Image (cartoon, grey):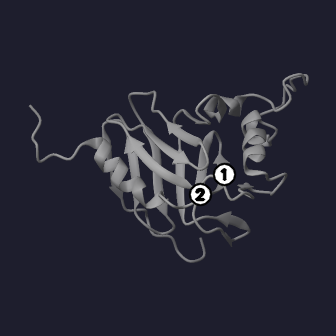
Amino acid sequence: MNDPSEISVASIIEGALKDLVGLRMALAFHAGNMRGFSFGNVYRRKGRFRGGYSLHISCPWRIDDGSRVITGFHDWYEQENPDAERDDDWYPDKGGTLQEAKLRRLFKDERTPKGIVNRTNALRVTKVHADSVGGCDIFLSPRYRLAIFPAASCDEYWRLFRARGKHFVVEAEKVGYHRCPSRSSSA
């Protein structure tokens, strides 16, 4: 029987995500197939746009509107134009993915270099919900949901952090805050 004083994994995750409520999903970016989203005020640092909170997702995810998938993890591996002849040298990091195209449409951002900027007033976090295996739903105005659903038994699933702050990391069988190694001001 569970100890009633133990806090559930879902409660811990929801506690970490609650600071996003009221903030707008401001940016989308990637490093390989890791998709990142920033929330809150946007600023520019070292030539890149940044937001107050960053969410790095390394497991399957999707954005839906309750009746259809807008885009998700696997769209990273598809070219934007499915009728185009597949270039043997094409790789998603080079751009032109279906995921990038769909996010640009959702954010109404044609071609901001080094990321996708939300040019709308939509996609504000209205509530969050988490499960006991590291998954979560981040509900966004007016009717969207970012669903994160781990599908592996090892490794890191996702992390949430503020610039120069502690990282809240969700891994297989472990969730919690980790101190990020400090960086020099020249990094």
131 left or right of 77? left
Cβ atoms at labels 1 and 2 below 8 Å apart = yes
Spot occupied by residue 71 in the image (x, y as percentages of width and height) = 67, 34
Query: SS class of the residue under badge 1?
Result: strand
Q: Amino acid at mark 1?
A: Ala
Query: SS class of the residue under badge 2?
Result: strand
Who's the residue at 34% across and 56% down the image? 177
Spot occupied by residue 2 in the image (x, y as percentages of width and height) = 12, 35
Q: Is residue 38 above or below residue 10?
A: below
- The numbered mark at residue 28 is 1
Sequence order check, earlier mark of 1 and 2: 1
Residue occupied by mark 2: 38
Image quarter where the N terminus lies is top left
Spot occupied by residue 51 in the image (x, y as percentages of width and height) = 60, 64
| Viewer-nearest residue: 173 or 10 | 10
- The numbered mark at residue 61 is none
